[in-house]
Image (tube, rainbow, N blue to C red):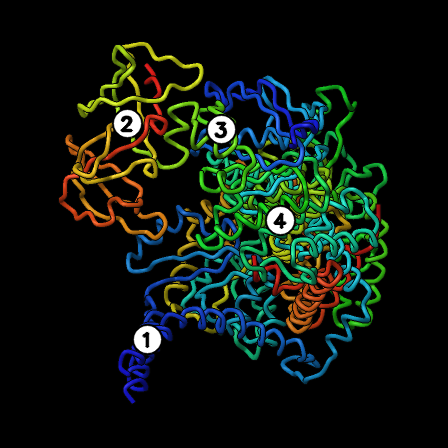
Amino acid sequence: MTDSRSPDLECLSLTKRFGAFTAVDDVSFEIPSGSFFSILGPSGCGKTTLMRMIAGFEEPASGDIRIKGKSVIGTPPNRRNVKMVFQHLALFPMMNVAENIAYGLRCRGADKAEITRRVGDVLERIGLPGVETKQIHQLSGGQKQRIAIARCMVLEPDVLLLDEPLGALDLKLRERMKIELKLLQHQFDTTFVYITHDQSEALVMSDRVAVMNAGRFEQIGTPQELYHAPATAFVAGFVGDSSRFSGRVEAGGTILLETGERITAAPRTGTVLPAGTTVDVFVRPDAVAARRPAELSGDAFNRIDGVLDSHLFNGAQSRALVRTGDGRMIEVGYPRPGSSENLAPGEAVALTFTPADTLCFAKKA
Amino acid sequence: MTTVRTTLIATTALGLVLSGGFTAAQAETLRLLTWGGYAPDKVIELFEQKYPDIDVEVTLSNNEEMISKLRATGGAGYDLAQPSHDRIFAVQKEYGIYKPLDLSKIDTAVMSEKLLDGVKANTTIDGAVYAVPHQWGTSGLMADKSKAPDIKSWADLCDPKYKGKTSMRLRRTILLGTAFAMGENPFEAYSDLAKYQALLDKVADKLIACKDNIKVYWQGGDDLANLMLSGEIVASETWDSTAFKLYNQNNNIVFVPPETGALAWIDTFAIPSGGEADDAAYKWINFVLQPEIVTMMSASTGAIAAVKNGGDLLPEEAKAAVAAAFTPADIDNLKFFANIPPGVEDMEGKTLEKIKAATGG
Amino acid sequence: MVQKDAQRLALFLLLMPFALWILLLIVLPHLGIGYLSIREKIGPRQYEFGPGNYIDFISEPIYWNTLLRTATMSVLVTVLTLFIGFPVAYYIAKVAGRRSRAGLFLLCLIPLWVSDLVRAFGWIVLLRETGVVSGFLQWTGLVSGPVEFLYNDAAVVIGLIYTVVLFMIVPIVSTLDGMDDALIEAGYNLGGSRWTVLRRIVIPYAMPGIVAGCIVVFMLTAGSYLTPILLGGKNSMWFTEQIYDQFITRYNWESGATFGVVLLAFTSFVVWLGLKLTGQNLANTVAKG
């Protein structure tokens, strides 16, 4: 595992305030060398400020940033070996491709022959050999993306920061670039720190993801951990789709939902919710099965009754929409073996899911 | 076909609108082309009271620009101009921008005979008279008596005693004045342009040598007044009217007629060849020669009207300034600017350029 | 068909004022000047065609010295204006907040609210021997006697810069305005120093504005009249003054027209030379900006 290597980037109790507003609040994390790390959060959560502090464009109010073990507080942006791919890429329009890539090398004082060689090398590695003399406006969106990465990678940075670079691309290209970015990261074997508000980008590409909300990190973990074992209600709600219920813990550990059903949730390590706690319950659509009540066998599952409202066909992501007793709509993964396929809208259905798939969090006061 | 016709109609309509705008001339407007101060608001008001159907429009200018403007339009655009007496003959011969005056319509009886005859002599071409006098004044020297008591001659501006403390206007007046100070008579040299050129060369040498002594060449009356009042200069070549005005603010500043004689000019009335309101123009001429208007006018211009006893009609404060400046001997010694023959302006212009371009101090 | 005709007519009418303006106020006067300049005066009301006026111009050192002097001073003013105007423009476009920007723009406009003449007199009041600056220096004891700042080339340069600096600032602000701040940050991020970022990113990006500003400033300066005359000293010659003298004082329209043509040709040549030397061309700078 990569854990044996020393961390490329460490942040310790990093805090940044703008006036009375705390944009980044006591954030600590470390990123092992050579991994793909994403910071995922809604807009305004402070992730861009965090990245700008790492790049050196903002000074933290307190805390420390260490790159390869050395503090970079007070080091100007141009002296940090942290390169950044900007949201709109910021390729220099008055230079051609080769000049864009050579810019950083020239700033370092590399000689002409070396520059030419390394520019050629890096273009080769990103799969765009021979585009040196093209102007920026002649490139396609995906090509620009790769040139922006090459412009940073040619400088062999300790850490590459990417600020939602896929945001401006159309859906198809974005899907392709996700995979391409992941491959590029493997190829360069450099630590990538990727900022996004798109959970699917974060889940697909990252080794580890930090979920950020209101200036704080809610959870850091692998995509699987975030999806299957979210640490907070925010993570459960923000990462992946889920249906959400409100309820209250009863004596004996069962949960009484506002809709009247009684369910159980598998206890999570380290958390015991005392009786009387009001809770939020999340269930992933793909953990829910919809069956005809008659077809149910045993009662090992949590169960909510409802009426099938409609099918939402979308290939692999198809869903069924079920209306519960109190009139709420719940999405159910579809199709599931031996389940809703042949159900018709209007039929009564029982929704079942295991306690292990039932995510339960104390409601914030 | 439709296109062509629509276009034609549209263009014609547009043309009509445009030309209509241009030809709608106002019949009863008197367009004056004159010097600053020569058409005071009060006088215009009184004139318009007396002749309610005449509107007076004033354009302020100077000799050179007056001629250029009229030359550009072939004498059109103005109904009455006021060039100096020496600037009419050659200009009229060359460009034909004025029309002969009908002296019977002008109240010549009130004019000073000497000045009227002088102007007539200067501006008669083929028996037709092109100008009558309005006001006269002189160019000479101005000095602050407390700081420069011994300024007497044009050449004294170049006295090293006053280095960096004198000024002049780089125009033809100083060329002529310097020539007189050198003991020459430039007006007599007009008849032989080669001789005049030689004289100009000598004058240029003198003035280039003098450049070191000069603080700056003044550009206009306000400019000169500021320099003199602030004490930055103590003596200068000047128009007498500017000096008279300053005398009222500082009694040490007086007009000094140079010992070779102050150079006298007469501003005249002349009717441009394209003038469209001759009657109104004659009315204006006669109107401003009335004694009470003359006093108002002189108060505004600082110059003396070319009427009989023009000096007596000056406002009181101006009379004092004139008295401080001129003795009767000085008046006798006046040198009236002689008619400028064709070509002389070009020669003088070139000489002035040479002086300006020379690197003095 | 009818619709197409109507469109064509509409276009024609729309372009008409512009076409008339160009024709009546730009083309015809220039043709007139050009025609006058090749007319030689051989006597009163007698003319013939020939290059005599141009030969006169070339054979009189005073004239072309003045032209060279005017051009040199104008280039100097342009360069200084660029040095003064660029930081101001950069501040307005990239540093100042949205709200203070309008105020700063207005401040730059103030010199244009008064006429040339008033502006020049303002400088005279400040710079003259008995003026404000001299008085202040004496009051502070820095100098013992009055000092004359007026009537020299420095005063002319200062007065001209003051008059034209806005024409440098506006085009640069508008090009820099369109520049994504991320380009500057990327410049630093990739290892550039302040100087490198300025030289390799900001200035190239602002080049269309800089070129436009320089051309306008140079043309305005070379063609200015009042400021050099009023602030300049007894030796200060400006080419426009020569033209004025030819037309007005000497009644020599033929020669004045020749000077006008020479000034136009020469300033155009200087602009062309400037573009060549800096490797720019109008199509991808001014036209683009």
Task: Provide the chain ID for the residue under circle 1.
Answer: C
Q: Element type at marker 2?
A: loop
Report the quarter where the C terminus of chain A lies.
top left
Residue at mark 1: C7
Give the residue type at disc 2.
Ala
Q: What kind of residue is marked 4?
A: Ala
According to the image, label 2 marks what residue? A300
- The residue under the point 27% across, 78% down is C3
For the residues tagged 1 and 2, is the chain the same?
no
Residue at 51 percent of width and 27 percent of height: A220
Q: Quadrant of residue C123?
A: top right
The spot of residue A222 in percent (x, y) is 52, 32
Marks 1 and 3 in Cβ contact (< 8 Å): no
Which of the two discs, 2 and 3, labels the residue nearer the N terminus?
Answer: 3
Q: Which one is in front, A358 or B187?
A: A358
**Residue B171 sits above or below residue A255 on the image:** below
Q: Nearer the viewer, residue A27 or C35?
A: A27
Find disc 3 in the rendering and name its residue. A46
Chain assignment, label 3:
A
Task: Work out whether mark 4 precedes mark 2 in sequence or the reverse, and give the earlier one.
Answer: 4
